[in-house]
Image (cartoon, helix red, strand yellow):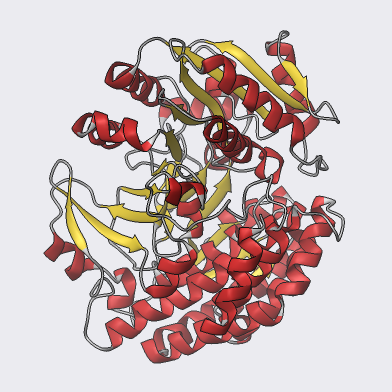
């Protein structure tokens, strides 16, 4: 037996024993475990961010370190708190969604309002909302009755799950481990992506209480370790994050034989497989009458959607859809160029980035290189045609394209939604940017457009990543994909209310930051978001938000606002 096989066998043996203890652990003990992980996340947050900075080549004084606070320890802290709340409700004989507003959503759906929930949400994310929509035909009573998933019967465990971790956003893998434990009631082995191997020591510290009791194991290694884990007879289920190409190689195998298996629908793996994959997330820019400040801010919004984490995000927007008839089109595109030009330069830390940028420039010789490093790429003149490389190849790099469609108002919006649904690869997230007056004038037609979009998270004047950061929201592809046409994946994660089989999350944000929002009649106090790549105080705000999430206190609110308002 090889050394790798020995390590895997030891992990599986520990997890088999741990599953028995997990079955014996009551909801109160599971809440205590979440509290321990929460406290250890707080205690190790600084080390987490320091290691993340080293992986991504970010200097200690980089303003981009705010990304690592907000997408690293912060969402793990909010998730442990939210999951503990769901378990407490179940312990008390209540549904996890009790106390949350449930309303009717279009086409016989129900909508659970998950943001804001409580006064602190209202203050810190003022102007942002999020709803989880069910599939059609699910009423509020059914939502309440089924919320809790496997924690409704905690003694009935479901084996060992493998999590093949992501290498881009460092909270993804630990959040996926929590979902195996609590949504599926499985103990879990996490195989880190090699990019994130330096995080092993800090993740082992954070998950130490679960590791000591055999509920979790964390392994490193290359593709061969992942394959041995996936193929192990004692592994009950697999969850992976990555690209559809990687998914198909794992599920069907590589090369011509893998393609044949995919065509025949005969996967190599005979066990449940869930996934959160990427795609070509569109941003639909609805024409309207915008001020110069609006144009600048929304151009920075687009630049953030692409350049956050240097484009290494599964939900990074890759293509904007705008109106060719918009009177302000040229002015807006000039602002987009400027925003991409001014965004901070960063290291191409993710493997293959330069090659993917080169492939985009080869496919589009007229693409524009922008930024002081010349690595960012803007592609204009795209067609709404699935033959376009930019609509089917996830570049996972600082490459951004623009499609122009004719029309205005509802006519443009219908065309844009049709293109997003029919021409773009993937269904993880889609964004709509629209002036409040335009949204009001479109009325029911705007609501229909949101309903018609077949995406797992929809952001309206808010990047869909806000849905990722909302622990109570579901996160994943639009339902209905299959192993042989996986698109952006199968199943959801996060979903701390443990809602049964949600369809999508709809996030809304302010069109303008405060104080312009208030001056223009929007009831929002939110300043420039800390995740914007142009935010000057994102590090301080991100750190303060993280430690607030660790232990909320009224005394911490003024410091967060003071930093955020300087952004």
Of residue 531 and residue 535, the one placed in the foreground of this image is 535
Residue 519 seen in the current view: yes
**Where residue 66 sits: x, y (%)?**
70, 58
Q: Is 93 drawn above or below residue 272 in the view shown?
A: below
Q: Which residue occupies 40% across, 26% down? A: 286
Of residue 518 and residue 46, the one placed in the foreground of this image is 518
Of residue 225 and residue 32, the one placed in the foreground of this image is 32
Q: Quadrant of the C terminus?
A: bottom right
**Where residue 557 sits: x, y (%)?**
55, 75
Left or right relative to 320: residue 132: left
Left or right relative to 291: residue 54: right
Count of all numbered marks drawn on residues in the image: 0
**Where residue 507 sits: x, y (%)?**
39, 49
Left or right relative to 177: residue 139: left
Of residue 476 and residue 39, the one placed in the foreground of this image is 39
Q: Is 488 drawn above or below residue 269 in the view shown?
A: above
Q: Quadrant of the N terminus?
A: bottom right
**Where residue 62 sits: x, y (%)?**
82, 54
Residue 2 seen in the current view: no
Q: Is 563 drawn above or below residue 43 in the view shown?
A: above
Q: Which residue occupies 75% across, 65% down? A: 49
Question: Quarter-wise, where is residue 11 in the image?
Answer: bottom right
Question: Quarter-wise, where is residue 300 in the image?
Answer: top right
């Amino acid at each position: 037996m090889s050394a790798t096989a020995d390590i895997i066998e030891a992990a599986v043996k520990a997890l088999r024993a741990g599953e028995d203890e997990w079955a014996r652990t009551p909801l109160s003990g599971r809440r205590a475990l979440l509290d321990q992980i929460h406290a250890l996340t707080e205690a190790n947050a600084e080390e987490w961010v320091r290691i993340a900075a080293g992986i991504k080549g970010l200097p200690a004084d980089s303003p981009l370190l705010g990304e690592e606070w907000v997408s690293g320890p912060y969402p793990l802290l909010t998730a442990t708190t939210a999951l503990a709340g769901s378990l407490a409700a179940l312990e008390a004989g209540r549904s996890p969604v009790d106390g949350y507003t449930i309303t009717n959503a279009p086409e016989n759906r129900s909508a659970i309002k998950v943001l804001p929930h409580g006064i602190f949400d209202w203050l810190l994310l003022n102007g942002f909302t999020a709803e989880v929509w069910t599939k059609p035909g699910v009423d509020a009573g059914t939502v309440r009755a089924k919320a809790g998933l496997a924690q409704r019967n905690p003694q009935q465990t479901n084996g060992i799950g493998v999590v093949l971790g992501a290498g881009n956003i460092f909270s993804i893998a630990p959040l996926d481990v929590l979902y195996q434990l609590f949504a599926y009631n499985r103990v879990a082995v996490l195989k880190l992506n090699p990019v994130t191997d330096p995080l092993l020591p800090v993740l082992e510290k954070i998950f130490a209480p679960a590791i000591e009791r055999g509920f979790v194991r964390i392994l490193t290694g290359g593709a061969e370790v992942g394959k041995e884990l996936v193929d192990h007879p004692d592994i009950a289920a697999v969850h992976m994050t990555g690209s559809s190409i990687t998914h198909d190689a794992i599920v069907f195998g590589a090369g011509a034989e893998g393609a044949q298996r995919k065509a025949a629908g005969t996967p190599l793996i005979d066990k449940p497989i869930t996934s959160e994959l990427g795609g070509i997330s569109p941003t639909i820019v609805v024409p309207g009458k915008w001020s110069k400040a609006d144009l600048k801010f929304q151009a920075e919004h687009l630049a953030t959607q692409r350049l956050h984490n240097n484009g290494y995000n599964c939900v990074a927007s890759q293509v904007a859809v705008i109106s060719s008839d918009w009177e302000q089109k040229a002015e807006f595109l000039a602002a987009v160029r400027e925003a991409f030009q001014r965004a901070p330069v960063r290291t191409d830390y993710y493997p293959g980035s330069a090659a993917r940028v080169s492939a985009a420039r080869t496919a589009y010789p007229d693409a524009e290189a922008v930024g002081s490093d010349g690595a960012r790429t803007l592609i204009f003149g795209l067609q709404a045609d699935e033959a376009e490389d930019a609509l089917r190849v996830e570049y996972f790099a600082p490459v951004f394209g623009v499609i122009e469609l004719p029309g205005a108002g509802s006519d443009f919006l219908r065309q844009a939604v049709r293109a997003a649904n029919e021409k773009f690869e993937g269904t993880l997230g889609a964004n709509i940017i629209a002036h409040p007056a335009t949204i009001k004038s479109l009325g029911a037609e705007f609501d229909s457009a949101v309903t018609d979009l077949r995406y797992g998270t929809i952001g309206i004047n808010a990047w869909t990543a806000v849905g990722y950061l909302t622990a109570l929201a579901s996160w994943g592809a639009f339902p209905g994909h299959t192993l042989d046409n996986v698109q952006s994946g199968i199943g959801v994660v996060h979903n701390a209310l443990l809602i049964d089989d949600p369809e999508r999350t709809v996030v809304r944000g302010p069109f303008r930051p405060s104080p312009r929002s208030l001056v223009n009649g929007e009831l929002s106090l939110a300043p420039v978001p800390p995740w914007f790549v142009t935010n000057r105080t994102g590090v301080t705000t991100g750190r303060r938000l993280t430690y607030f999430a660790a232990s909320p206190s009224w005394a911490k609110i003024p410091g967060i606002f003071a930093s955020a308002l300087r952004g």
